[in-house]
Image: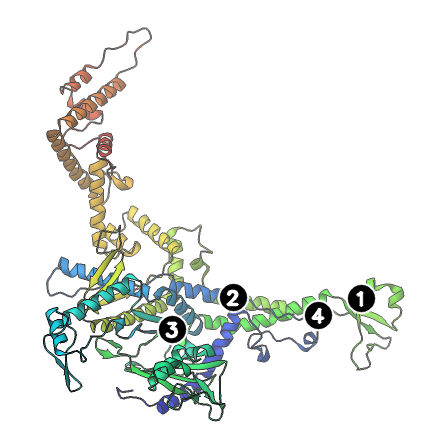
Amino acid sequence: MTDETISTARIVRLLERTRYQHEKTSMNLKVRRALINQTTAEFSEGNRLGTLLPAPFQKTSLAIRTMIGAPAKAAQHYASRIASNRPEISVVPITTKSNISDTVDKMAGAQERLDAQLWVESGGRDCQWQMGWAMSVGGAGYYLTLPRDANFGLPDRITYGDKTEDEIEELKKSGMVSPAPHEDGGKLIYAEHGDVWAARRKKTMQANFESGRSLFTLQAYPRDMVLREKDNDGIKWAAIVEEIPYEYCAPGSDLARTAAQYNGISGEDIDRYGLFIDKKTGQIVGGIPRGGPLNTDWESSDVYTLIRFFTRTEEVILISGQGSVDTATEIWRGRHGCSIMGVPTCPVVEVPFFQTDVSIEGQEFSTPLSQVFGIVPQINQLLTLASNAAAFNGIPRWVVELTDGSTLRTEDGEPKMVESGEVPGLDPNEAAAYPGTLKQLIINTASIEKMLEMYLEQLEKMMPAPVTSGAAGASAAAWQVRELIQQAQETLRQPVDNHAQAVKQIIQMWHDWLRDLDVPIYFFAAPGKRNTRRDFRSLIEFDPKDLTDSIVVAQELDTPGERTIRVQQGMELLKAGLIDYQKFFEEYDKTEDSRQAVIDMYVQQVVSYVMSGILPLGANPNTDPSGVQPVIKVVADSVRGALNYALLEQSPNYAIATAEAMAQQAAQQAQQMQPAMPPGMPAPRPSEAGEKAQFGQGDANLAFSAGVVQPGMGMAPDLSQQLGNRMGAPLA
């Protein structure tokens, strides 16, 4: 498909050809949904679901169709694993310098928060769940994204073609009009001053963001709703086909108004025209050039078919009768402007679960559920037979066996069935009324049960591993559980990566649309990983010209429970000295900047020890294998001593309080160190050491042994707490 305009007739031919190839895929997906939802009405014939009833049971009122819930359980598992973690967007700054400047880093952080906010506000989280379901059940799903409003809802520039010269001069003086006219359609006219127009657009953009109105729309579609054709550059064209109710096409509806405007109808007449079907031609009429007052040959339909057709440059909307595309009528056409790094792109993004090496329709994609969907109908059929046999055996029935070995029959030639109600308790006198022997009919289900057991064993192997759903491994060591989880996650790594890459494409499309704006964009967002201020949400202004497509989108596989197990495994390795802190943060804690995390940890340890004298993590500073804790202790002792010395110099009251506390602690320690006195001995005098310490003459060693640290050697923990209380906030 080139940039050339594609005709409606060409679109219809493409749709007809592709839909014929797509029919088998659509039917398979309908069957899969019926297996998941456990509905039998639509597919009871043909036994696609495994719920066929044998002839004897079809004639009875007690007919049981049994379906298992395994498909729904498996689909929910895979869908939730794809959708449980949101995509993490990282901007990779590009610079010619060896180090990234603070400005570049700050700008990268702002864009990360902008991209994340755009994903959320466009409905990305809800669409992600729908996409997970579409990928798991159908093997692939599709995203469609477009700007919510034309030109993002920004006001057009005001022109003053109807103003007099005096009025123009007054506008010039007020700065509301441009100094010179510009040519418009061969006519020179004055327009709104560029600065004034830009200010209005900026104000509108800010108001839209403050009201929570998203810039883009995002929808997720299952595989059977999308027809498409691909080439070496990706999707060449795509059509989203869906059935809509009559209300969407009635007079006054958005579609009917769009069709009317597209065909030159305006004013009060616009709401008179709906979209109807011509009985003679089957074509859609109304709101199109042939439209006029309602005609008796026109009729409404309960359901219409809406077709949104996209090339790499155009969007075309067509309406047809239910279930058909050959009579589709074009009601709108326009250029969507979608591109990635300046290259025109179809706004429909394909997201496969597994991509196969086959390009044949229906075989391009694969999902682990395909095996489940293949075996479940057989299990359903066996369960249906077993359930009906059990119900049959539960209601006693007899036939009459005659003396010659034959069976008593009805006038129709069928075996005479004797219901339990006719011979209650099988009273011998009542049974004697029949010219033979009563024999109870019993259906032997042994073979059914044996086959059912075999199929259920096979199904168990096809279902998701129990460890990924928390059903196993709870008593095992963290590393053992983690190994089981990693093995089970091998199936999910590719589809999750495929989804992350699709999100990257969508964000790059958004970037190109936003670059066409001449005003900044605004967004509310919590500060991101590059900003340590996390206690507020602020309105952030961002110039679209600063957007970069140098981004990485990643998506975690682990659930919160699995992340806990992973961190536990890392802590075990860290404690054993097999890994260092950076490797722990990088591979087990999954911190985005592991180097910075290590630095932050050491800084926090120094701060904590400075303020409290307690080493975090409870590590022994003399046995720490990393050799870091002794360094922290030395640094912290020096800092605490310097802080204490400065406070002593600057505050006489603090100095007195410190001396008193030191004396008290020394006296208490000295008293505790004195040996117990024999009975009858006089009580000892107050400690001389304590008295001397009260006047600053105490023994330094005694003070140290009492937990009082001299300036330059750190501050006692309890004194640090007292200081924190005086300051009105506890010290960390």
Q: According to the image, what is the colour scheme of the structure?
A: rainbow
Amino acid type of disc 1? Gly
The answer to whether residue 190 is left or right of residue 326 is left
Amino acid type of disc 2? Ala
The disc label shown at residue 354, or none: 3
Mark 3, mark 1: which one is toward the viewer? Answer: 1
Identify residue for label 4: 443
User: Do callouts 2 and 1 mark residues in contact (Cβ within 8 Å)?
Assistant: no
The alpha-carbon separation of the residues under discs 4 and 3 comes to: 45 Å
**If you read the primary sequence from the N terminus, does the residue marked by circle 2 or circle 3 appear first?**
2
At label 3, counting other C-alpha atoms closer than 10 Å, the crowd grade (few under 14, some 14-19, many 20 or more) is: many
Residue 627 visible to the viewer: no
Image quadrant in which the C terminus is located: top left
**If you read the primary sequence from the N terminus, does the residue marked by circle 3 or circle 1 appear first?**
3
Amino acid type of disc 3? Phe
Instruction: Using the image, determine if residue 695 lies above or below residue 362.
Output: above
**If you read the primary sequence from the N terminus, does the residue marked by circle 4 or circle 1 appear first?**
1
Mark 4, mark 1: which one is toward the viewer? Answer: 1
The answer to whether residue 315 is left or right of residue 412 is left
**If you read the primary sequence from the N terminus, does the residue marked by circle 4 or circle 2 appear first?**
2
